[in-house]
Amino acid sequence: MEWRDEGIILGTRKHGETSAILEVMTRAHGRHLGLVRGGRSRKQQPVLQPGNRVDLLWRARLDEHLGTFQAEAIEMNAARLMDSAVAVYGLQTMAAHLRLLPERDAHEGLYETLAVMIVHLDDADAAGELVARFELLVLDELGFGLDLSQCAATGTRQDLAYVSPKSGRAVSREAGLPWRDKMLALPAFLQRGSGLRADAAAVDDAFRLTGFFFTRHVYEPRGIEPPDARAGFLAALRKHHARGKAIAGEDAAREIIT
């Protein structure tokens, strides 16, 4: 058995004295593992880092075997991403979500989205929006997608402000008003075609929304905990936003003084 594909490295672990088990998200073969002989060498280690995009050749005697990878760098992203706590935790969070999917199941849309995410993940102002959208995509791939296109009660596509925790469908501000305390907030930036950017409060609402449905449909039924990386990512985002507010406050004070 043999195939060639491109993939994004999600992680590695040691195997024996000189080799490594490589975990990648591939374009056509889904999340896939394989043995890299000599993967712990000085030459291979910089290539086999999370976030790097690589050309892969996989070989095995039988399809169900672990098999071996030969990996060559296409895009070396790891060094850039490791300079940002937001990027590191963001990548780890997305990798954890991809592990919820069956191994070797193709999800080309998720691969393409992950590739775009990695380009912008070290932009902390954009990372929250990007990872929140990625979580919605993963929920959809798992069969628990949310319908944020129109109001579940009236059919309107305007002024959607809530999501029903029961149905996972959007609800307009007017229709949801009597039950607003029981609804989940729908950040405007998550609505298709809105073109809006998210502030810190909207990002928090987005992760509260996706987290609710991950817990209900995935974590609790499987008896697992949310990934620690997700909490680390949210903490890194809040720290970034707090730093931004402090800098803005200092600039405003400086303008008043001068």
Image (cartoon, rainbow, N blue to C red):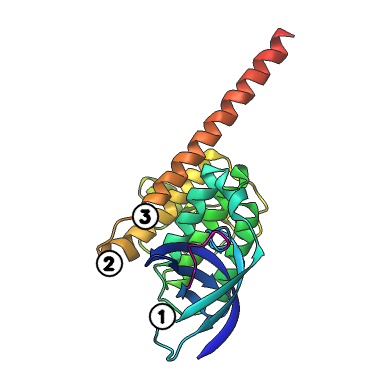
Cβ atoms at labels 1 and 3 below 8 Å apart: no
Dot 1 corresponds to which residue? 66
Q: CA distance from mark 1 to mark 3?
A: 25 Å
Dot 2 corresponds to which residue? 222
Would you identify the image quadrant in which residue 235 lies? top left
Which badge, 2 or 1, is on the more N-terminal residue? 1
The amino acid type found where label 1 is placed reads Leu
**Residue 92 magenta-highlighted:** no
Magenta segment main secondary structure = loop
The amino acid type found where label 3 is placed reads Pro
Vertical side of 111 occupied by 228: above or below: above
Vertical side of 26 occupied by 187: above or below: above
Dot 3 corresponds to which residue? 227
Which badge, 1 or 3, is on the more N-terminal residue? 1
Q: Position of residue 142 (x, y in %)?
A: 42, 72
Q: Position of residue 251 (x, y in %)?
A: 67, 20
Q: CA distance from mark 3 to mark 2?
A: 13 Å
Which badge, 3 or 2, is on the more N-terminal residue? 2
Q: CA distance from mark 2 to mark 1?
A: 25 Å
**Quarter the C terminus occupies:** top right
Instruction: Tell me the magenta residue range.
Output: 37-43
Q: Disc 2 vs disc 1: which is toward the camera?
A: 1
